[in-house]
Image: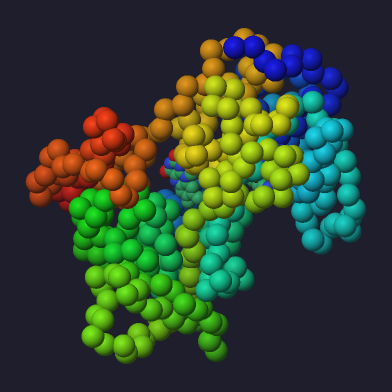
Amino acid sequence: MSAENSEVSNNGIVIIGAGLAGWHVIDAIRAKDKDIPITLITADSGDRYHKPMLTMAISQKKSAADLVRATGIDAAEATNVKLLANTQVTDVDTTTQQLQLISALRSDPVYTNYATIGYDKLVLAMGAHPIFPKSLPEELVWHVNHIERFGQLQEKLATGSQHVAIVGAGMVGTEIAEDLLKAGHQVTLIDLNDAPLSQMLPPKATSRIAQAVKSQGINFLGGYQVSAITRISDGKLQVSYEALASASATDSSTAEPIEPLIVDHVIASTGLTVDDKLPTAAGVEFDRRTGIVVDAPTLRTSTANIYAIGDCMSIDGVPCRYVAPLRAQAATIADDVLGLDHNGYEHKPPMIRLKNKAISVMVTGVPKATGNWQVKTESNEELVMDLLNDSDEVSATVTIKSPANPKA
Ligand SMILES: Cc1cc2nc3c(=O)[nH]c(=O)nc-3n(C[C@H](O)[C@H](O)[C@H](O)COP(=O)(O)OP(=O)(O)OC[C@H]3O[C@@H](n4cnc5c(N)ncnc54)[C@H](O)[C@@H]3O)c2cc1C
């Protein structure tokens, strides 16, 4: 496969976003070309860290600083990259191939001053943002999608045992619930569905996960919707929630209001969305929920000279929000922007592994909650189920194992 345009002028390659995706692209380009100009623009400090650690670090008593593998400044120097940290890209002009920039620091005296920078090739690696439903106001709740915010939460929790409500029992919510429990906190995990991971796995599988989570000591409230969060006098938060009519947890014979929870912190893990500003400005094919559409073999977007990778990107309508494929994707982008021949990226859905110790959950393929799931193995210790497509081919497999000693 040959690159779309092997000519690269002085503006070089510009990467937006210094998460795992952005840094992987830099490593891949530098493995092939030590000199081509690369500019990394990022709204944060650019520090390198392994984001999956954010759901394991609190019980390991690790602060945000402990998780930083290299500061943005040091990593940029080591890779010969021009780093524009604390800088937000606010607009893309694809005709002139220019980006508009603003300081991301509100305290910065030039906060309102725009600068522009040109690109020859642009890589969008700007991640995805947590969704905050109306009932979870951003100013009252935490998220663990970025090391800076994580660091602030970790500092608060390091002061002693507290009660934390986690809203959303997807992978991140379920993992952080166990991590906080292990760190000695009281944990309430709330989800619309009857069991964790219900948006990707069938009830037969998720009921085992619910059971494991509960037996560990996590207060799992399945089938409930948080309706409001309010700050009360002593700095605590009141979490009001209601039963959903369809959930089995609901006792439909009573309409009594549920006593609100009083907690020290609320963490929202209610999903991710991709900010539409830059994709819209760049005219790339895009969906807020799943991300920027790319041509899988090249990782090119629908706009010339613009690529996408990481949490902001999707392949075949499925978001790519796992670490494992990043290396191969970055290598393809590197070859393509440098004008080197390559075989094309071949997308394989990564193996998904829940990091919880109370139960082992492993998924291959592209799982979804509904569909023709068939049991392959079923015992007290193990459940294996296959998801069959219309042609009776296996499109996903889940393997759940209950460890002999979950607290070890
Ligand atoms: C708590 C947690 C645990 C996880 N655990 C696992 C796991 O066990 N296994 C796994 O495979 N995956 C896991 N994931 C997913 C994985 O970590 C992510 O898919 C990956 O880190 C995403 O990297 P990214 O670089 O695309 O995005 P991000 O890390 O979000 O980086 C985006 C960057 O873009 C910058 N940016 C955004 N907008 C702009 C702008 N307009 N201008 C300038 N800069 C901008 C941001 O400042 C940031 O630097 C986990 C995710 C979370 C949150």
Query: Is 361 left or right of 78, judged from the image as shown?
Result: left
- Above or below 1: residue 13: below
- Above or below 162: residue 2: above
- Above or below 185: residue 340: above
Q: Position of residue 28 (x, y in %)?
A: 61, 22
Residue 170: quadrant of the picture: bottom left
At 29% from the left edge and 64% from the top edge, which residue is drawn? 194
Quadrant housing the N terminus: top right
At 55% from the left edge and 57% from the top edge, which residue is drawn? 130
Can residue 64 be spotted in the picture? no
| Residue that protrudes farthest toward the left in the picture | 379
Which sits in the foreground, 323 or 161?
Answer: 323
| Residue that protrudes farthest toward the front in the picture | 390
Instruction: Report how many numbered discs are placed on residues in the image.
Output: 0
Q: Position of residue 27 (x, y in %)?
A: 62, 25
Can residue 307 be spotted in the picture? yes
Query: Is 283 left or right of 182, judged from the image as shown?
Result: right
Which sits in the foreground, 24 or 291?
Answer: 291
Q: Position of residue 311 (x, y in %)?
A: 55, 42
Quarter containing ligand 1?
top right
At 34% from the left edge and 42% from the top edge, which residue is drawn? 367
Q: Position of residue 314 (x, y in %)?
A: 53, 38
At 25% from the left edge and 36% from the top edge, which residue is drawn? 388
**Color encoding of the figure:** rainbow
